[in-house]
Image (spheres, rainbow, N blue to C red):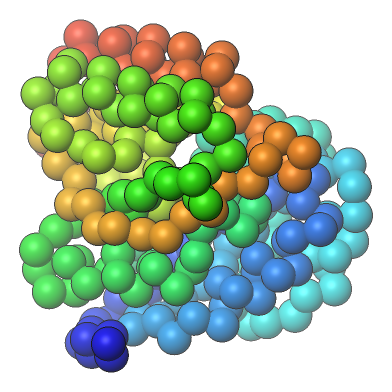
Amino acid sequence: MAQPEIPELAMKLSILMPVYNEEKRVAEAVKQALDVDYPTEIELVVVDDGSRDRTAEILRGLTDERLNVVVHPRNKGKGAAIRTAVQNATGDYMVILDADLEYDPQDIPRLLEPVLDGRATVVYGNRTFGSHSSFSFWYVMGNRAVTTAANMLYNCYLGDLETCFKLMPIALYRSLQVRSAGFGMEAEVTGKLLRNRHRPFEVPISYRARTREEGKKITWKDGVEALWILSRERVRKPSRPA
């Protein structure tokens, strides 16, 4: 079935890609991100988060006027890499895209649809897990547990809190003042959005999880941290509008 046409909008999308030790995938990840036919102007901000393999060398060899590469001298974590990417972004909206090839950038225009037609400001990509798309039963259960906790704490109904695909105005992300340096940023972003009454619009996306052997980095400890962060953010007062 043909994809519906999305109207052009005078906005710029910043695609933010944190990278750590991804020499086997980073060139293809960048290529896939830049090859998509987007309905808006885009830039790709890649933050090499202190990689110790050939990632930095590979990134130096990539040339595209839409590509901006920033390097951390040492590894600081995903949240810190996104914070640096946001500081260097020049777009109106942002979306996060990991370099591990688990997510398909061809889905990003679908995330833009509800923004471009005025239905939403914040959009999350909702993954469907199956035997072909998830490396671990316990990983899926952990994701569901964290998402369920958020739904109970904030009286909402999210389908996938830990999704990488979080699309929103850059000004909104900056206003959240996300402090988590690692994977806890996913819970912190969502907790702060929900606490301030921003309910994400969700669209289905494709997904293929890689295995531990392939470099999967998130662990059960990140799930425990996410639960703590969600609880912490729930008891804080909503931010006052500017």
Q: Position of residue 7 (x, y in %)?
A: 20, 87
Instruction: Give the farthest residue toward the front.
Output: 131
Above or below, 218 relative to 37: above
Q: Quadrant of residue 116?
A: bottom left
- The quadrant of the image that shows the C terminus is top left
Q: Quadrant of residue 54?
A: bottom right
As rendered, which of 237 and 210 lies closer to the eye?
A: 210
Q: Is residue 71 visible?
A: no
Residue at 33% of width from left, 83% of height from top? 39
Residue at 74% of width from left, 60% of height from top? 25
Tell me if 92 is positioned left or right of 215 in this view: left
- The quadrant of the image that shows the N terminus is bottom left
Q: Position of residue 230 (x, y in %)?
A: 31, 18
As rendered, which of 63 and 136 lies closer to the eye?
A: 136
Residue at 78% of width from left, 75% of height from top? 62
Q: Position of residue 199 (x, y in %)?
A: 15, 41
Residue at 29% of width from left, 58% of height from top? 204
Tell me if 94 is positioned left or right of 195 in this view: right
As rendered, which of 110 and 234 lies closer to the eye?
A: 110
Q: Position of residue 22 (x, y in %)?
A: 77, 51
